[in-house]
Amino acid sequence: MHTHRTVRTTRAVRLAAVALALTATLATAPAGAVAATGTTARADAAGTGPGPELRAVVERGASTAALAEIRENGRRTWRDAAGVTDLDTNRPARADGYFRIGSVTKTFVATVVLQLAEEGRLRLDDSVQKLLPGTVPGGDAITLRQLLNHTSGLFDYLEDPRFLYRDEASLRTYLDRGRWVSYSPADLIGAGVNGTRYFPPGQGWHYSNTNYILIGEVIRTVTGRSWQSEVNRRIVRPLHLDDTTFPNDRTGLPGPHAHGYVALPEGRTDITRLNPSFGDAAGNGISTTADLNRFHAALFGGRLLSPARLAEMTTVVPAPSIGAHYGLGVIRYDFPCGGVWGHTGGIPGYNTIWLGAKDGTRQFALSFNLTEGAETDDTATTLNAFLEKASCGAQAPSPAVTGTNPPFRALR
């Protein structure tokens, strides 16, 4: 839930925004050296995986941990982990660890909506007023498609002051009390529809998490079940994504996981446990790199949507503020070796980049525990070097041209 606007070191920090990458940048603190450790798969030992680039994300990128996996044609070709699970024990991070996926949740939710459209239970050009009567003032002029591709113009509820902390004192308040607050979808929608709209429906592009909270309620209205139930029934269980959950308001993570941190003057402060209900259908999920890559292969490989619906999902509009193009719950980034598809996301302490080939033959997932406020000048360059190697493999450009690709900007 990062904002699409660059967060600067003014301490005016946002507890939210663009990819549901909700990471806080507060007082500048030394990055600190975190050992880049972990188990590297055989493909990396053979020089075919981005192991050095992954370790650089930790060593020079202000992350305490980074986990990644690459798959091709249904087979894992490389997996690695760098950094530590937590700063108290310094145990090596595990490549099979769980992490919060933030706005990657949106792709699961959008897939369910497109399945419902295929079943004739709704139309993408239905108005919000028809689907959710009385919920959004002026909802007769906003379509479901505009919610899905962020052209509705609706205010992002995470821009509301109650979701902001602007200084050290307000961050400490959040760490003490705010992160335990439970929000209902109605709370989030209320903040979104009462905010100033960015533009008339269909007249621009602006990432707004409010869109997907509304979509979650559309799923509930149409099916009589929660969006979590429908995602589990239609995607998680059929694909055996056994390590993917949508915890609503549960504060912890299951199984092995690296801890997330925010920066304070005295050092990094653990923010692993929090109530993720503020994310709801815009970013509530937890998963692993293996599960995300299986989902990507199934989605883009045509196992979840018909060719016509997948074509709709990948019909994009320009998203200039994140340097990309946005479809219906998916993002296209353009690398030197071609376009890659997926989504980015995050939540305090956790960031995810999940991308792959449009035909479903190759995908990679990266989770990195970036402590915002502790970044170095190398953070973007090292991250982009990993992304280019993971996306392009042997076609990756030389380091001299790295550091300019959009996924890191989207996470800002």
Image (cartoon, helix red, strand yellow):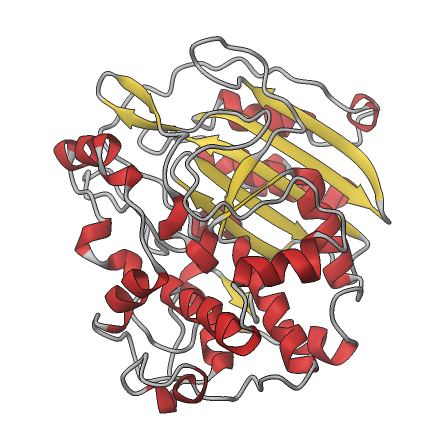
Residue 11, by quadrant, is top left
318 and 363: which one is in front? 363
Q: Quadrant of residue 232?
A: bottom right
Foreground: 142 or 253? 253
Task: Give the residue displayed 36% in from the left and 66% down from the top.
Answer: 210
Counting every numbered tag in the picture gives 0
Q: Among all residues in the image, which is located at the extreme top? A: 89
Q: Residue at x 82, y 54 (%)?
A: 361
Q: Position of residue 337 (x, y in %)?
A: 71, 54
In front here: 209 or 38?
A: 209
In the image, is 407 to the left or to the right of 412?
A: right
Rendered position, 321 above or below 51: below
* Residue 117 vertical position relative to residue 405 in the rendered view, above or below: below
Point 52% across, 63% down: residue: 226
Query: Measured along the vertical axis of the image, is residue 95 above or below residue 360?
Result: above
Residue 61 in sight here: yes
The x and y percentages for residue 327 are 57, 71
Percent x, y of residue 83: 55, 19
The extreme left residue here reads 169
Q: Residue at x 73, y 30 (%)?
A: 79
